[in-house]
């Protein structure tokens, strides 16, 4: 009987060793795949600064009613890492990624909204924070953030959420400055 028990334990030990080896092998493969994915999804640029992300004077001035002031008060600073998308094609057709750059760039240039989709597939519509300049057409994110379509970026700004819809408001002047410096550095 002892001999049979030893044989059973030997078979169990070999099975565990084999299973562990397979698991280790699969874990190595998974780790390599995760590293490749992480490399592809590393942000190419970080826009917005937690030290300056806030509601500007023109936004406070635009909050004329108590309800407006409550919405502003509910806003919070947020940093989101994800892929820049053309919101219209993303919501209508699920389009995103490198294969959608030509179409998405045209949509953004024509005024369709820009968004960022995080790793949990949450969509944030991205706006210039400065209320009066945005309203008056003096600031736009079309050329700055729009030029990053299909890229993974990190954005910091003020976030609001209403009825499940998320918006991220970025300091346009600050972003224009960062993007201008980046363009100058490339030359």
Image: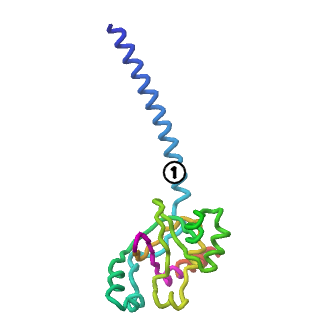
Image point (49%, 73%), residue name: 125
Query: Is residue 59 or residue 36 the one in the foreground?
Result: 59
Residue 164 belongs to magenta span: yes
Quadrant (top left/top right/bottom left/bottom right) for the N terminus: top left
Q: Residue 162 versus residue 150: which sits nearer the camera?
A: 162
Q: Residue at x 43, y 27 (%)?
A: 17
Disc 1 designates what residue? 35
Is 137 magenta? The answer is no
Magenta span? 162-176
Residue 107, image x, y percentages: 63, 75
Furthest residue in direction right, as rendered: 102
SS at mark 1? helix
Residue found 51% across the figure and 87% down from its top: 134
Of residue 132 and residue 15, the one placed in the foreground of this image is 132
Query: In terms of image quadrants, where is residue 120?
Result: bottom left
Which quarter of the rendering shows the C terminus?
bottom right
**Of 174 and 185, which appears nearest the observer?**
174
Q: Is residue 26 above or below residue 184?
A: above
């Amino acid at each position: 009987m002892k001999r049979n028990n030893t044989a059973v334990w030997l078979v169990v030990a070999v099975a565990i060793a084999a299973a562990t080896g397979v698991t280790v092998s699969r874990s190595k493969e998974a780790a390599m795949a995760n590293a490749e994915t992480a490399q592809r999804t590393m942000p190419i640029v970080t826009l917005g600064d937690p030290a300056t992300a806030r509601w500007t004077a023109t936004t406070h001035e635009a909050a004329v009613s108590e309800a407006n002031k409550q919405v502003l008060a509910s806003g919070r600073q947020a940093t989101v890492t994800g892929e820049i998308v053309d919101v219209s094609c993303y919501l209508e057709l699920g389009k995103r990624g490198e294969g959608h750059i030509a179409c998405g760039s045209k949509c953004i240039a024509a005024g369709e909204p820009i968004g960022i989709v995080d790793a949990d597939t949450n969509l944030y519509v991205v706006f210039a924070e400065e209320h009066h300049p945005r309203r008056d057409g003096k600031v736009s994110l079309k050329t700055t953030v729009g030029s990053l379509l299909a890229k993974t970026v990190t954005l910091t700004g003020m976030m609001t959420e209403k009825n499940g819809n998320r918006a991220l408001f970025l300091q346009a002047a600050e972003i224009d400055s960062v993007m201008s410096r980046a363009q100058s550095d490339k030359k």
